[in-house]
Image (tube, grey):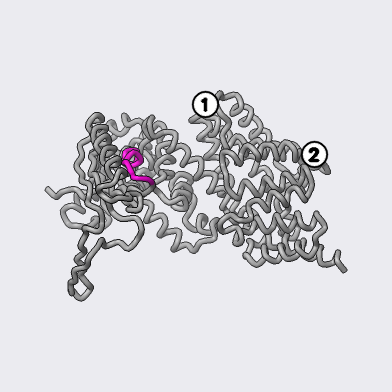
């Protein structure tokens, strides 16, 4: 196994947000939704203030999702709804450019959630070249 | 040395490979005339090897076969001598104990990389098959590399959480070494944790919880000679012969605890645990422990560390201070906790207190329930003895 880096270099991490959509009664027209959007605006502002380069997006609620599944035999099928069958579903993400996993975790702890949920912190593959 | 390399290379496996090659090169080439600065020589040669591995792997997609050992140039040796090798062990400890690693992985990695125990010894101590342990180590190293866990002492904003993870790892490493009570040769883990917690206390002398954890490991390890009877059965803490405890370790623990008490700030869980152990350690032969004081300490501990482990120990202390009925009531209070039915210490405590309260039939049931959960050998012998004693009493 070969060293990924020899020396300091920043890393990109995805912060993937998973929430139970019961956190948003009233859906995208509801008060809870509006409140969390506002919190995300503020969170983006905090990232800017801290000089962290980032990208990201919020997603429409999962009823709007369509899944394309490809089987081991290559057969494909189109399904109504999100892929995951768990209660917590993907709701949005940030990709942040930080110096360490510790920093990524610290930002992940501040990602706004409707109520409870989880944020997965995963390193992004470097681009070749 | 290894940790300085790991810090530079950010890849523990590469560092271990490079260090191994440097040592082999040293063994082959130093002979009667070792270099003036052996550490710098090793470091320079190891770095050279690491660059070679990386370069070859990039070109050919794999690591090179064992080439002839590289010779360090005078420039490389001078460069290596200038590299600071301070706090290296602390960096390694923080890395191995990162909260992004699974607790069992942290324990295994710390024992392997920081303490130098063999994978066989670690597997033996935690009653896991060696291949499982080897896989655990491999996964942990991969996670460190791929998730970008740095080989450095954490920056100030992250310090508290990272240190808490280090202390928790040491505590788990000590507490879950099953050979603790029965198997031979596993004293190694206990002594390593005494040493590591002591080294931490030296490096971070102003942190009350660090001092307290060092005290705690000393108190626990001091009791090792008294833990088993002649047949290998477990002897519970309040029945142990204080004359068999290691007085020097107890004195060292007491000194550390006194220093911890002098540090301003709120009292944390390790200080409370160490104080409880200190209270037990002050017991004279034939005397009971100061149960009232111990129960009071557990009351506070339950506030900062809620959960069944503390609750059960607290119940036992309450029983000592106020009688079996009070202790049983305290146990009853957590009977609804998730998973408690499958938890051996709860059944064992219930059995003991039920027997004391005179309810022999219920006590026997509880002892059987505890035995059914498959305790380690020393505890099994103890529980079987108790069950037999109860059975013969009722004849």
Spatial distance from mark 2 to mark 1, Cα to Cα?
32 Å
Quadrant (top left/top right/bottom left/bottom right) for the C terminus of chain B: bottom right
Looking at the picture, how far across and down is residue B16, in whole percent? 36, 48
Give the residue at x 49% y 64%. Answer: B129
- Residue count near mark 1 (Cα–Cα under 10 Å), binned few <14, some 14–19, many ≥20: some
State which region is magenta. A105-115
Q: Residues within 10 Å of mark 2 (few under 14, many from 20)?
A: few
Q: Nearer the viewer, residue B76 or A96?
A: A96
What residue would you read off at disc 2?
B284
Q: Which residue is mark 1?
A: B206
Judge left or right: residue B163 versus residue B37: right
Residue B124 higher or lower than B153, as above or below: below
Q: Where residue B127 sits: x, y (%)?
A: 54, 60
Q: Earlier in the sequence, mark 2 or mark 1?
A: 1
On-image quarter of the N terminus of chain B:
top left
Instruction: Tell me which corner region of the image, top left, top right, bottom left or bottom right, holds residue B290.
Output: top right
The quarter of the picture where residue B272 lies is top right
Residue B39 percent across, percent down from the top left: 37, 37
Residue B395 is covered by the magenta coloring: no
Whether callout 2 and callout 1 share a subunit is answered: yes
Which residue corresponds to the image point at 36% horizontal and 58% vertical from the top-left?
A: A87
- Please state if B283 lies on the left or on the right of A104 as rendered: right
> Which is nearer the eye, B54 or B99?
B99
- Residue A119 vs residue B29, the one in the foreground: A119
> What chain is tagged by disc 2?
B
- Seen as rendered, the residue at the extreme right is B395
């Amino acid at each position: 196994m070969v060293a990924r880096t020899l020396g300091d270099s920043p890393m990109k991490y995805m912060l993937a947000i998973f929430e139970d959509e019961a956190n948003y009664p009233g859906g995208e027209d509801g008060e809870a939704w509006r409140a969390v959007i506002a919190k995300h605006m503020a969170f983006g502002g905090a990232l800017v203030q801290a000089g962290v380069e980032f990208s990201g997006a919020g997603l429409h609620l999962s009823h709007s999702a369509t899944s394309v599944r490809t089987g081991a035999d290559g057969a494909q099928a189109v399904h109504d709804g999100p892929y995951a069958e768990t209660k917590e579903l993907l709701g949005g993400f940030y990709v942040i450019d930080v110096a360490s996993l510790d920093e990524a975790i610290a930002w992940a702890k501040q990602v706004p959630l409707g109520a409870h949920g989880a944020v997965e912190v995963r390193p992004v593959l470097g681009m070749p070249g | 040395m290894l940790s300085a390399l790991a810090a530079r290379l950010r890849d523990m496996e590469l560092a271990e490979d490079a260090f191994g090659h440097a040592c082999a090169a040293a063994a082959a080439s130093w002979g009667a005339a070792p270099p003036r600065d052996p550490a710098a020589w090793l470091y320079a040669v190891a770095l050279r090897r690491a660059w070679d591995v990386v370069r070859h792997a990039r070109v050919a997609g794999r690591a090179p076969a064992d080439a002839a050992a590289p010779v360090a140039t005078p420039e490389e040796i001078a460069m290596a001598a200038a590299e600071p090798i301070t706090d290296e062990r602390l960096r390694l400890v923080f890395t191995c104990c990162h909260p992004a690693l699974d607790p069992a992985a942290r324990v295994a990695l710390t024992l392997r990389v920081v303490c130098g125990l063999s994978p066989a010894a670690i597997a033996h101590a935690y009653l896991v098959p060696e291949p499982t342990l080897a896989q655990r180590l491999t996964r942990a190293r991969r996670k460190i590399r791929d998730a970008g866990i740095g080989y450095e002492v954490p920056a100030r904003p992250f310090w508290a959480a990272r240190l808490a993870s280090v202390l928790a790892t040491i505590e788990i490493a000590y507490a879950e070494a099953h050979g603790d009570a029965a198997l031979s040769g596993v004293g190694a883990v206990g002594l390593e944790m005494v040493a590591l917690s002591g080294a931490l206390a030296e490096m971070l002398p102003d942190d009350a919880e660090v001092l307290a954890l060092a005290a705690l490991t000393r108190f626990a390890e001091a009791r090792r000679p008294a833990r088993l009877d002649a047949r290998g059965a477990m002897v519970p803490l309040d029945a142990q012969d204080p004359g068999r405890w290691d007085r020097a370790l107890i004195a060292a623990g007491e000194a550390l605890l006194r220093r911890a008490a002098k540090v301003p700030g709120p009292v944390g869980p390790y200080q409370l645990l160490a104080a409880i152990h200190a209270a037990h350690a002050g017991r004279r032969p034939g005397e009971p422990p100061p149960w009232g004081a111990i129960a009071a300490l557990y009351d506070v501990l339950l506030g900062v560390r809620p959960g069944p482990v503390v609750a059960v120990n607290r119940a036992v202390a309450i029983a000592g201070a106020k009688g079996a009925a009070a202790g049983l009531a305290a146990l009853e209070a957590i009977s609804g906790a998730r998973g408690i039915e499958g938890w051996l210490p709860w059944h064992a405590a219930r059995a003991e207190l039920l027997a004391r309260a005179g309810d022999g039939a219920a006590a026997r049931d509880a002892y059987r329930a505890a035995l059914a959960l498959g305790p380690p050998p020393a505890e099994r012998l103890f529980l079987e003895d108790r069950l037999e004693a109860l059975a013969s009493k009722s004849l």
